[in-house]
């Protein structure tokens, strides 16, 4: 025979009413409900993760992967096309970045995969200019129809720009992911 033992539970006298994030914003539960979401940001946070909340004190709290940048674009010819841009900021610094790009053409069908690493520094101040350190390293995996395609990292003004080059006569869908570290 089973026995049920009832004990008196004590309810905490108070529950958290404000959740403070890393950036000093805060989320306030409504009816004891706090919405927790995940997302990514290109914000520079050395640990690669941070928490934020909506600035107006809503009940939304975010766990963010930082130092990330994604982009998508479709090309229909061999024109260089920007897929992602990473501003370097006005403080003199060095950015090391790595990433990958996927390319797909549905009509052939054909695909390609590209990975890259590179490093850039900027001169700092109001007239900061990005300077590529050496030349980026790349790996390319392409099916025959996409062999003319390419990916490039370039310095443009004070930005690091990821560009793709498609193939004349083919509609190519591109998808990129960049992660970086800044010193």
Image (spheres, rainbow, N blue to C red):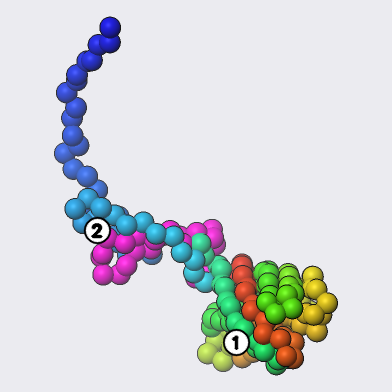
Q: Is residue 153 visible?
A: no
User: Dot 2: few (<14), some (14–19), or many (≥20) neighbours within 10 Å?
Assistant: many
Left or right of 39, for residue 2: left
x, y percentage for residue 166?
72, 85
Q: Is residue 6 magenta?
A: no
Q: Residue at x 16, y 39 (%)?
A: 13
Rendered position, 2 above or below 117? above
Checking the image for residue 39, the label placed there is none
Q: Is residue 56 magenta?
A: yes
Q: Nearer the viewer, residue 152 or 1?
A: 1
Give the percent coordinates (x, y) of residue 83: 61, 82
Residue at (60% x, 82% y) in the render = 73
**Residue with the mark numbered 2:** 28
Return the x and y of residue 37 as percentages of the image width and height: 39, 59
Q: Residue at x 57, y 76 (%)?
A: 71
Element carrying mark 2: loop
Residue range in magenta is 43-64
| Image quarter in which the C terminus is found | bottom right
Quarter of image, res 6: top left
Q: What residue would you read off at disc 1?
A: 158
Q: Position of residue 173 (x, y in %)?
A: 64, 79
- Is residue 27 or residue 132 the one in the foreground? 27
Above or below, 32 against 52 in this view is: above
> Which numbered disc, 2 or 1, marks the residue that appears first in the sequence?
2
User: Outermost residue toward the top?
Assistant: 1
| Residue 79 seen in render | yes
Q: Is residue 127 left or right of residue 33?
A: right
* Mark 1 neighbour class, 10 Å CA radius: few under 14, some 14 to 19, many 20 or more: many
Which structural element holds mark 1? loop
Name the residue at 61% across, 91% down.
157
Quarter occupied by the N terminus: top left
Q: Is residue 47 left or right of residue 114?
A: left
């Amino acid at each position: 025979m089973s026995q049920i033992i009832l004990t008196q539970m004590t309810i905490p006298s108070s529950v958290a009413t404000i959740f403070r994030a890393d950036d000093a914003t805060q989320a306030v539960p409504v009816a004891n409900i706090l919405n927790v979401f995940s997302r990514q940001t290109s914000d520079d946070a050395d640990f690669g993760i941070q928490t934020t909340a909506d600035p107006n004190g809503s009940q939304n709290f975010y766990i963010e992967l930082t130092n990330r940048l994604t982009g998508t674009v479709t090309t229909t010819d061999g024109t260089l096309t920007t897929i992602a841009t990473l501003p370097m900021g006005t403080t003199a610094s060095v950015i090391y970045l790595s990433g990958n790009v996927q390319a797909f053409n549905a009509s052939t069908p054909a695909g390609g995969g590209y990975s890259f690493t590179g490093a850039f520094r900027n001169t700092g101040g109001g007239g900061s200019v990005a300077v590529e350190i050496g030349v980026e390293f790349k790996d390319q995996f392409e099916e025959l129809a996409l062999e003319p395609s390419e990916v490039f990292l370039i310095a443009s003004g004070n930005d690091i720009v990821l560009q793709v080059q498609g193939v004349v006569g083919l509609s190519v869908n591109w998808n990129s992911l960049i992660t970086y570290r800044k010193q």
